[in-house]
Amino acid sequence: MLKPVDVIVAGAGIAGSSSAIQLARLGHRTVLLDRQEFPRHKPCGEFMSPETREMLEVLGLDLPSHKLAPVSMDKAMIILPHGGEISAPLPGPAIGISRYELDRLLHLEAQSAGAEIVTKAAVTGIRKLDGGLYEVEARQDGGKVRYQARAVIGAYGTKKPRDLASADEEAKKDTVYIGLKSHYSGIRTQNQVELYFCSGGYVGISAVEAGKANVAALLTLDSVQGNGKSVTEILQAAARSNPRLATRLASGTPIAGSQVSMAPVRLSEVPQPWSDFPHIGDAMLMIPPLCGDGMSIALRSSLLCCAWSDKYLKGALSYDQWQSGYSKEAAAEFSRLLKRAGMIQKLAFARTNRLYPGLARMFPGLARYVVKATRLSETGMARQ
Ligand SMILES: Cc1cc2nc3c(=O)[nH]c(=O)nc-3n(C[C@H](O)[C@H](O)[C@H](O)COP(=O)(O)OP(=O)(O)OC[C@H]3O[C@@H](n4cnc5c(N)ncnc54)[C@H](O)[C@@H]3O)c2cc1C
């Protein structure tokens, strides 16, 4: 069976579903494929920077006034393993909303824009054919379904579809992380995001809707070996090297069914906006979660990519212009940010691991850097 459409978006997270909204609104027959069933929990700090909120507004999602009542935050606090803390105001109000709800709301928008969403459909291969067409193969309904599309957008997050993953990448010797999260009841946060450094990584706590707190962590895979298998056990083990985190976790109760993890997570060294088709979000660039900007990058790259893809689909650009236009713009937009974010990640890990005297004095700079320097420019596309 071959299904002809204008565009296939592979992956229905924040990057993919926001692309489906835009392309369907522009009149393109759009199919959004995801291997998971929704709504679903996703390992994420669920801290939405001011830029993310603004870009969602452009897509028609006005979160601050939504009936779900997401939480507003105006302060960031870093808590070091020995108990010292640094606070800094956020450059604008941030929002806490679960990915369970956010991705569900984006899917509703995509559907009302006319996109078709197919879940439990794992993309296994994307092939560029002669004549400007793509063939996308998905494992779906217990069999294989093949789609034919004029354009494809890769929005599948950090893990490439099976046929596209290269052995080189898997064999890389870089640091490999695990990302995980659990919602808790009973942990009260005061309009702030809290970042706890601990052995092997960091744990973020911030409020989401309905009085729940989200606890998310990025830890090196090495550091979690032998620390239990469940998300709750791993979080408790991480808290052994940060007593204030242990106290915080003990004040709440994990909410059953909200625990999820992803591994291996590899942080990007350079943006990878293209491989026969455009990539967006984490598929293009995985930034250290410490920066709280992954969702913002997902949305920004989706906005950029959809503008180029729309022109290509309407015949105003050749394939080469589509490729070079988006690739150049994405590289210019994200390369510097990624470099700075990588430095912060290294600094954070190196400092906390050594715990030498005077550490706390180093951190006010880091706190400001984390909160401000890694943010995408607030004068971005959202206002254009
Ligand atoms: C521990 C942690 C904490 C974080 N905290 C924050 C934070 O506080 N704030 C922030 O802004 N960012 C944060 N991030 C980053 C943020 O979660 C990501 O940048 C963002 O989710 C990227 O969106 P995406 O749509 O590209 O990918 P995803 O949200 O991962 O979506 C990808 C989708 O593709 C689907 N998929 C994958 N493979 C296939 C396939 N073969 N076929 C079909 N579908 C497929 C998946 O099921 C998934 O639904 C955090 C990340 C981690 C790991």
Image (tube, rainbow, N blue to C red):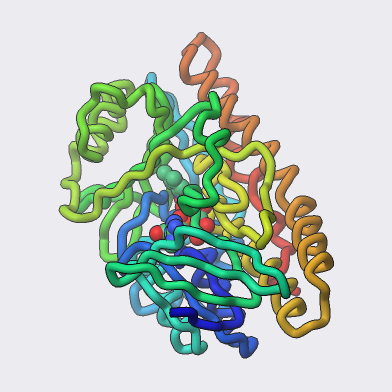
Residue placed most toward the observer, 244 or 340:
340
Rendered residue at 56%/53% (across/down): 283
Rendered view: 175 above or below 94: above
Residue placed most toward the observer, 160 or 202:
160
Q: Splitting the image into 4 quarters, where does residue 262 fall? A: top left
Looking at the rendered image, the quarter that the N terminus falls into is bottom left
The answer to whether residue 48 is visible is: no
Rendered residue at 30%/52% (across/down): 213
Rendered view: 363 above or below 62: above
Residue placed most toward the observer, 2 or 264:
2
Q: Is residue 147 left or right of residue 317?
A: left
Rendered view: 15 above or below 158: below
Residue placed most toward the observer, 186 or 202:
202
Q: Splitting the image into 4 quarters, where does residue 242 fall? A: top left
**Image x and y of residue 194, in percent:** 41, 42
The answer to whether residue 318 is visible is: yes
Rendered residue at 37%/50% (across/down): 43
Picture mark count: 0
Looking at the rendered image, the quarter that the C terminus falls into is bottom right
**Image x and y of residue 220, in percent:** 42, 28
**Image x and y of residue 67, in percent:** 35, 79
Q: Is residue 291 left or right of residue 118?
A: right
Q: Is residue 277 left or right of residue 351?
A: right
Rendered residue at 20%/29% (across/down): 228
Rendered view: 310 above or below 305: below
**Image x and y of residue 24, in percent:** 57, 84
